[in-house]
Image (spheres, rainbow, N blue to C red):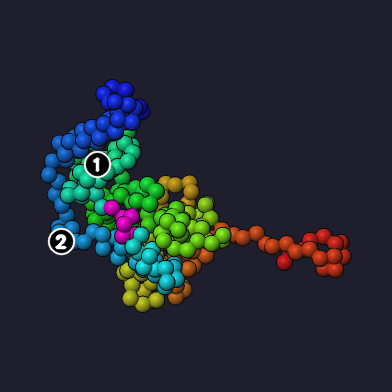
Amino acid sequence: MLFPAWSGVNTVDRLNRGHRELLAALVAEVKRRAGEPVVPPCLRGLDLVGFGRKKAEPMVRGLFPHSEQDVVLDLVGRSVVFVTPKSIRSILLGCERLDTAWTVANLYLGSAKAELLGKSAPELVGFSEELTCFVSLEYFRDEDPFADFVVHEVAHIFHNCKRRTAGLPETRTREWLLDLDFRKRETFAYACEAYSRIVQRSRTPADRRALAQNFHGFGVDDNRVSSTEIADLVRAACMRRNGWKVILGYCAPKRPRRLTWAPWASKSGQPESA
């Protein structure tokens, strides 16, 4: 971790040199393995920054008050990073952590159908780290009518980002962009993902309800979520005018009932539920 094999005037100098040289070596190896990957025709001339923002816009408009929507959308535009042949070098060289660079490199190699960097390398469509969502070109090849990795990961940003980080006022009771029950965070992301695709594909409320009947969950192998619960939540959302609020309300923390105490309120003199 301290790069003792590198020369330098001090430890910090060795750290900086080792970090830069390992990233440069990684860039060279990724280029050797990937060669010149074929870019999907749908990406030619596409504004990827605007694309990520556009994908998340209905969700942002449905979850946040009008006065905050543009600020949140600007945050989303900066957070979604598509890993392409044109951007891979600058992304890798800009990684502050070597393990992040290794994961991004494998994400890119997978999208290029090239050999990954070891048997333990994960096969990913994308992943998030703090407030950045890295997305591979496999995103544009996914044919699942209810899947949208960008919306899923942006949904996670909302509970990971503090309001002051996004440039919004923070209060004692409003610290995060969205306050979600820790156990419901994945449910929230999956429900937003499916609901966003239904909204995108429908023109009327009746269309939404019809599409929701064909959604039975993602069948994910994840003990944090239930496919049946997600499907029921999405159907409930499609029954309301603003389904985003239905999803948020279901996944919000359940506040404990406030207790009041007054000697005249109970024969026993004990506190009673308000």
Q: Which amino acid does label 2 sit on?
A: Gly
Magenta segment:
76-81
Q: Position of residue 102 (x, y in %)?
A: 29, 37
Q: Earlier in the sequence, mark 1 or mark 2?
A: 2
48 sits to left or right of 131: left
**In the rendered image of this protein, does residue 29 appear above or below residue 265?**
above
Q: Residue 93 carries which label?
A: 1
Viewer-side residue, 179 vs 212: 179
Q: Which residue lies furthest to the front in this view?
A: 9
Magenta span has 79? yes
**Tag 2 secondary structure:** loop
Query: Which residue position holds label 2?
Result: 45
Mark 1 or 2: the one toward you: 1
Q: Name the residue located 15 percent from the left edge and 59 percent from the top edge.
A: 44
Q: Can residue 110 be seen in this view?
A: no
Name which quarter of the figure residue 268 lies in.
bottom right
Residue drawn at x 44%, y 67% is 63
